[in-house]
Image (tube, grey):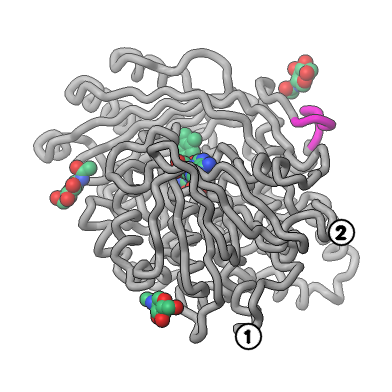
Amino acid sequence: MISSLSAMTSTPTMWFASAAVCILLPSSLILWQKICKSPPSWIRELETLGVPRKKKLPGTAVVCGGSIAGLVTARVLADHFEKIILVDPEIDSDKPKTRIMQYYAAHVFLSLFVASARRLWPNFDAELQAAGGRIVPADTQVHYSGVELGTPYKDYPAGCLPDTLVMRRSSAQIALQRLFMQHTTTANVTILAGTVRGIETSSDKAVETVIVRERDGTHVSLNDIALVADCTGTTQAGLKWLESAGFSLPENIRYSYNGNLRYATLTFIVSPELEATLPLPDLVKNTILVYGFVSHLESGPTTFALVKTDNNTMQLLVGNNGDGDLPRLASEVVPFLSNFRGKAPIPSWVVETIRILCENCSPSFDNIKIPTQSYVRYHMVPAGALPSNFIAIGDAKLQLNPIHGQGFTKIVLNGITLNSLLNTVDPRSNNLPRDFAARYFKNDAVNTEGLWDATRLHDYGYSTCEPMKGETNDTGGLVRWFELKLISAATQDDEVASALWHVRHLLAADRALLAPTVLWKILWTRPRF
Ligand SMILES: Cc1cc2nc3c(=O)[nH]c(=O)nc-3n(C[C@H](O)[C@H](O)[C@H](O)COP(=O)(O)OP(=O)(O)OC[C@H]3O[C@@H](n4cnc5c(N)ncnc54)[C@H](O)[C@@H]3O)c2cc1C
Ligand SMILES: *[C@@H]1O[C@H](CO)[C@@H](O)[C@H](O)[C@H]1NC(C)=O
Ligand SMILES: *[C@@H]1O[C@H](CO)[C@@H](O)[C@H](O)[C@H]1NC(C)=O
Ligand SMILES: *[C@@H]1O[C@H](CO)[C@@H](O)[C@H](O)[C@H]1NC(C)=O
């Protein structure tokens, strides 16, 4: 969940080609600067998110999976379709979700998520705050090898830095589900407690029927299908449905690599009296993280972060890439942290705060092994070989290394793309255009593929990472070299720090790092790490 590095969101080849153009043609520098600094398309498209169309499209849109991707997708689709059915075996209760492994892990919601959720749910702030969530300025307090990566307060009027949400996943999930149920458009959403088992298609390769197994074991067929959205997360169930329905997908449609990631979340219940004794500097009382540490690639693949979460909870999360054990007892935590080495030491107030918490709060431990990272490349499927009305959103399509905290933000990026594309559909047509799904996957890949490239190539720098088929740990060496130059410069220069921060929060496109004034500094600033 640590919002940190791996910033770039377009492909590395594009990067270096653009850089070359920029260096070779000085006459185009001014234009190039302007292009690089222009806002990404999704920021412009945010304007129409949450705005219902006048005449709804006919038919039923089925959303398979009712976690964050499912809720966002159903909310977006309710602005476009007459009827929505949201299917999830665990949707109709506030009980803990057993199918979401990271249900108790610490999560942050980056600025683009908050900006989008506010459009979808005008009472987002009030509801999430009432549930105990913290809406705070997007100051991450991430320290690379102990050195702070700055936050661009100076770019915004006082008090106007974009917001983020910090909350336990479990609390956020319940609050978002409530928010969803209250919205006026939900009047036309039917909630179905069940598991989607498959799809049937018509002769023109559109999904016609969705088969659901209800909790009592009975099967129902949902008909008159306008659109099906796979929001099944890690299950990536859409792949199976398509294969069973006779679609032959390319063999390498699903890329995956194994980061061998492990992740421990310690939760502390902190009474106001105890909180008053913690030696926290004032600044970090209103930031995303109290303190975050990311090790230098070469000194071990470990990160940790202390976070103030909802109500009276704090969480300490520790992530590593397979080497050594993560702490499992309160008494092991402070000795474990003493193994962290960097350019700058961990401040003593951080260690002292964690010591007080461990001694007084008997933390609960949630230690998990994170499944492989994967990318289902639906956009590579040849035209006509996918149903025209099948899409996938969230982890069902792209599952990233969670340490960068991009999971939910990626979901709203998918949602913005979907909403914009639906706005181009003629309300007089009875069906979605034949190329609808292909266009969704193509448009979406432009916005999200770079997240896969940047996080994957970053992870290849760790000796414990098992690269995907066809790649080795040498792949992406140039990207890792550039990343280190970028971080080095960001710790020394405000403009670079600001560009990196905006890209990290998905408020700027990665081309912001290639603006001549920024790129120049990245390449020429004295290396620090
Ligand atoms: C340790 C960890 C920490 C993370 N930290 C962050 C963070 O700080 N910030 C962030 O943005 N992201 C973070 N992430 C990523 C984030 O948790 C995921 O991106 C997010 O949960 C994806 O949501 P989703 O709705 O796509 O899938 P999921 O949350 O996995 O939900 C899938 C849903 O589909 C349902 N389902 C499955 N199969 C079927 C079926 N056949 N029919 C019907 N329903 C079905 C399940 O019941 C479930 O409700 C983290 C992930 C991990 C592992
Ligand atoms: C957090 O506090 C709010 C407001 O007091 C309460 O409604 C909510 O249930 C609390 N959340 C948890 C998980 O305890
Ligand atoms: C629900 O659907 C009906 C029938 O299509 C439509 O008239 C009504 O406006 C919809 N309500 C909402 C809140 O979208
Ligand atoms: C790269 O992989 C090889 C073989 O898999 C391994 O021996 C080597 O240590 C790795 N190098 C790094 C820098 O991780």
Vertical placement of residue 465 versus 379, above or below = above
The type of residue carrying mark 1 is Arg
Q: Position of residue 98 (x, y in %)?
A: 39, 33
The residue nearer to you, when weighing 147 against 441, is: 441
The residue nearer to you, when weighing 505 against 105, is: 105
| The residue stretch that appears in magenta | 468-475
The type of residue carrying mark 2 is Ala
According to the image, label 1 marks what residue? 428
Residue 99 lies in what quarter of the image?
A: top left
Q: Position of residue 372 (x, y in %)?
A: 62, 30
Residue drawn at the location 77% of the way across and 63% of the way down = 204
Q: Position of residue 29 (x, y in %)?
A: 80, 73
| Ligand 4 under 8 Å from disc 2 Cβ | no
Q: Which mark is residue 20?
A: 2
Q: Position of residue 18 (x, y in %)?
A: 82, 61
- Secondary structure beneath dot 1 equals loop
Q: Is residue 507 visible?
A: no
Residue drawn at the location 41% of the way across and 61% of the way down = 114
Residue drawn at the location 59% of the way across and 58% of the way down = 228
Predominant SS along the magenta part: loop
Vertical placement of residue 461 versus 527, above or below = above
Q: Earlier in the sequence, mark 1 or mark 2?
A: 2
| Ligand 3 under 8 Å from disc 1 Cβ | no
Check residue 384 for magenta coloring.
Answer: no
